[in-house]
Image: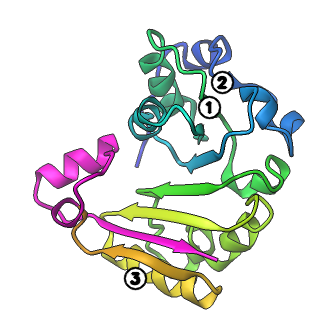
Amino acid sequence: MRLKNVRGAKKIIDNSSYVIQNPSAYKGNFKSLFGNNNPIHLEIGMGKGQFIIEMAKLFPEINFIGVEMYDSVLVRAVQKLETQELSNLRLLKFDATNIKDIFNREIDVLYLNFSDPWPKNRHEDRRLTSLKFLKRYDIIFKDKKNIIQKTDNRKLFEFSLKSFTDYGYKIVELSLNLHQDKNFNVETEYERRFSEKGFPIYMVEVIK
């Protein structure tokens, strides 16, 4: 998918109090950004930020960090926050392949919402639920490893289930039609668009 360039995106991002410019400097001590010891939930591939922003509003007792690697996408989340005051939310810009350089045993829950499915077999290792990425995540978790995934891509979902279980994760919740099965669900922009067209949303929560 080709991303639409947003004029002045970098400047907007650089001037935002929500965006942490040097995240690696906080490795192992992200709690200092929030000034408390509340749990930290992380979303990788936050897109335009609808999910992470709404979660931060709903759960002030939890600290949220959203990660996005593209300026043209991250800027949309920053723009949404211009009139908000959420002390429990911070945003980071980096490539998830470098996640071990950013976090060290401080994340309680990881959200993977509508990640790129990378459908070609030769790109399997790029999927955020591949064994290569699951190994990278090991060091970021504070204690129990807890991942929640949502996707509209059935093949990615099936791949993820096998990847999770092969790596020792246990499935604690699973849905093949999330909007039909679950009363509480915070949507992403992408999710709303596709669910309105009648596409099923797949969800799994795993722990280790």
Q: Which numbered disc, 2 or 3, marks the residue that appears first in the sequence?
A: 2
Mark 1 crowdedness (10 Å alpha carbons): few <14, some 14-19, many ≥20: many
Image location of residue 96, percent across then percent down: 67, 53
Chain-order first, disc 1 or disc 3: 1
Looking at the picture, how far across and down is residue 179, in whole percent? 20, 59
Name the kind of residue labelled 1 in the image: Leu
Q: Residue 163 carries which label?
A: none
Provide the residue span drawn in magenta: 179-208
Q: Name the residue under label 2.
A: 19
Q: Does the magenta stretch include residue 203?
A: yes
Residue 158 - label: 3
Residue sticking out furthest to the bottom: 166
132 vs 126, left or right, is right
Whether residues under marks 1 and 2 lie with C-beta atoms below 8 angstroms apart, the answer is yes
**Amino acid type of the residue tagged 2 in the rendering:** Val
Label 1 sits on residue: 91
